[in-house]
Image (cartoon, rainbow, N blue to C red):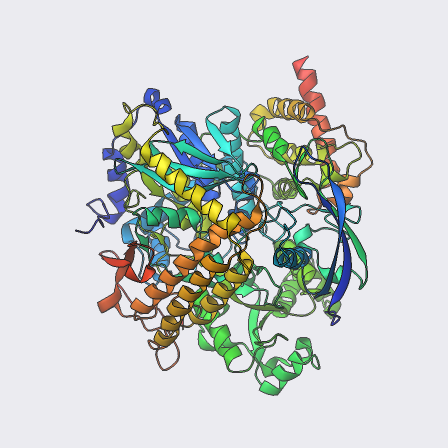
Amino acid sequence: MSAKKGLSLTLKIWRQKNNKSKGQFETYKISDVSTDSSFLEMLDMLNENLVNEGQEPIAFDHDCREGICGMCSLYINGRPHGPDTGITTCQLHMRMFKDGETIHIEPWRSAAFPIIKDLVVDRSSFDRVMAAGGFISVNTSGNTLDANAILVPKEDADSAMDAAACIGCGACVATCKNGSAMLFVGAKVSQFALLPQGRVEAERRVLNMVKTMDEEGFGNCSNTGACEVECPKGITLEVIARMNREYFVANLDKG
Amino acid sequence: MSKLDSKIPAGPVADKWKNHKDHMNLVSPNNRDKIDIIVVGTGLAGGSAAATLAEQGYNVKAFCYQDSPRRAHSIAAQGGINAAKNYQGDGDSTYRLFYDTIKGGDYRSREANVYRLAEVSASIIDQCVAQGVPFGREYGGQLDNRSFGGVQVKRTFYAKGQTGQQLLLGAYSAMSRQIGKGRIKMHNRHEMLDLVIVDGKARGIIARNLVTGEIERHSAHAVVIASGGYGNVYFLSTNAMGSNVSAAWKIHKKGAYFANPCYVQIHPTCIPVHGTAQSKLTLMSESLRNSGRIWVPKNIEDAVAIREGKLKPENIAHENRDYYLERRYPAFGNLVPRDVASRAAKERCDAGYGIENNDTHEGVYLDFSTEITKKGKEAAIEQNIHNPTEQQIYDLGKSWIEEKYGNLFVMYEKITADNPYVTPMKIYPAVHYTMGGVWVDYNLQSTIPGCFVIGEANFSDHGANRLGASALMQGLADGYFVLPYTIADYLSADIRTGTISTDNAEFDTAEKEIQDKVNFFINNKGTHSVDHFHKKLGHIMWNKVGMGRTPEGLREAIQEIEEVRKDFWANVRVPGEANEMNMELEKAFRVADFLELGQLMAKDALERRESCGGHFRWDHATPEGEAERDDENFKYVAAWEYNGSDINQEVMHKEDLIYENIEVKTRSYK
């Protein structure tokens, strides 16, 4: 562990009062930041200073601070969730930065994620895609088959789990030059495509989810793979390929 | 006259739930759309309840403070979910899960509720598998299980180290289906700020739209509180930053009794505190205790050298390590229940053997080297590698660990910059889960008619200590399989009531109170941030209402909290405006409630003159430092009644705990 303590930093942070007003970068100075602190703890410190000076603190989304709820966002020095890989912003630690550095902090950038305030965006478009088909239509009554009556090969269950690990943070959309949500939607489609449960409605699912995804204003996949690089949970482009395959077959059947 | 009627059905414990279901009133399918239900919170309990109630045909209005129901804190649970399926054929049964839960809870939970929990647990797994939750599987395609602290069977189902996430996403997908059908009206970024009672019944809530700041009225025929636990009263905890007690506390102030507030679970395996700027503690799943051995140096000089960075743990010989759990509790070893493991760590650190380089030296090792070697040797045999080299054994063992706990190891390394495959993890206990909560009867109804409380927000199932992997089980049991039945019994009287109006005096009064409070916070010319007060409260709570409690400490805590509270109302500063997103204002409302609850927790802890589960009183301990319970005088639930803003005036009601099916014994894990 690095023993170096007390970073001094210059922060250029996007401030925007609300969705209707224009935003701009503001500059803040902060010192004495422990290298053991997380990035969000550094922002907590800054906010504490701002409140003490009677200024309004910076609004940013966060909750579990364990890298799993997907609430935190932040575009840091041009990358979603900052310079480290395989993590969310809450797991980014200040030891990744150098003393005296200038850090740019922006909200997610995408038309489908309108800004609410400062660094907070509205990701409810993801929820609407989910409501269009991101589920298996089973009654929540408990009167289902015994769990072991549905055998799932371990490899399939593991692959489904890898796809299901998506936390819906939106980094894939934020980093994509087309604002495409195909990694997110592909992950959900893949999870169900790999399992015997829910196979019955697989075609409806992929058609409805893709349709809603388009309606919500997400762009098309540009095959540059930036989403895969920035995904904190290691979701791979394979899920997009699988979704495309599912979508293609579903369309053939429909025709 | 006490309102504490537990409404436990008569008959043998194994038949109670079935008989009760057979005789409860129903709401017929064609009448259900005449009924509105509010569900506050969308974690495992609230999410599963909302989905099921909507599925049955009720109009559900669901609320969560996050931007999506998928982010509720249940998502962070890692290890697994218990269910008495006996797939492993190791003798598990409904009775055994019931027994382990009661015993693990130190005989302070309600028998009938716990039996029902064990009974419905098997259905949860069936339900979740049908929903597409990708549980871990054996090569034959069947479900895999592992073991957790405090039990001697393998009954824990898991989805890698992300079980809570997958179960919550299962409930969220079931909700999404109902949202798509228009049966659930989802209110994201909304926070409940008060309960509205009309003619003695819960008939709605006042909520704040956290984006626009608008104070809204929502009515319903019943209100379900599923707002989780109150661990954030300690400021530093494993809870999500936004987790709060407000919904539960608001109904308490409106007449719902609050039970056993002093029961807090301190989880043994968290990453230790690193410094004063810390906002949050991160849990390492308890499942790691299956494969890890906990130790501190046997010699105090070694501990000092480690703290000073002069010695590395891997260089301390096996015989110079004190595997204190294996030493003290040979039968359960590293898998003793959480309260026992937590206290044992505190005992070693207090004695000076802690290894973490922080102010308090609070930290012990969780070491995987033995397991890596053992699994490596096994894998070598499996792969027909004769005379494997040490490197081969390590590599094979490492890949076994990686498969099982990989994401946890990555997470640990990101936070601490240490590689746990090479050097042992540093861990220390932290506040995790609260067993106390709103008092509910067998139907999960609070003392306010029409106000139901489910999941961690209620009190009934875990006693004084919760078994590992039982939180997920309780949340889903309440939401999928218990509440949907019991709430129908209550609602059957409401099929002719019609829509509840929000234009009446009760809604006016409740809204005005909230509006006044908003105005106060925004206009108060204070000097300190909300966090300033929250941290002060947390400090008092951790030091005096934490892992070890004394009567003097508790009396001091009550006094000190009262002072912080006074200071808060005089000197809090909330910048920004009321009619827009204002996160400081959100926190101010929550901390105001934590300050009152914290005082009640200390008061409850002071009254309970015994040690049980997570409530450990130094004046009630055996000479060996084990908890000393007092069944004769304290085998009851302490249910507190609000009596005005002076928390010291709360009145305690007692519900005696009656054990007919289990012999109450002294817990021993030796």
Percent position (x, y) of residue B223?
36, 37
Q: Residue furthest left?
A: B1
Relative image position of residue A71 (x, y in whole percent):
61, 45
Above or below residue B199? Residue B84 is below
- Image height of A176 relative to B615, above or below: above
Apparent side of residue A70 relative to residue B638 in the rendered image (left or right): right
Q: Residue at x 68, y 45 (%)?
A: A73
In the orientation shown, which residue stands out farthest toward the top?
A255
Q: Is residue A245 left or right of residue A131?
A: right
Q: Is residue B482 visible?
A: no
Nearer to the camera, B72 or B584: B584
Residue B652 visible to an observer of this rendering? yes
- Identify the residue at image location x=58%, y=27%: A133
Quarter of the image that includes the C terminus of chain B: bottom left
Residue B642 vertical placement versus B486 (above, below): below
Q: What is the total number of numbered labels drawn onto the structure image?
A: 0
User: On the image, which quarter does residue B580 sit in?
Assistant: top right
The image shows residue B65 at horizontal and vertical percentages of 52, 42
Of A38 and B122, which appears nearest the observer?
Answer: A38
Question: How far from the left and from the top, in percent, is residue B592?
Answer: 45, 54
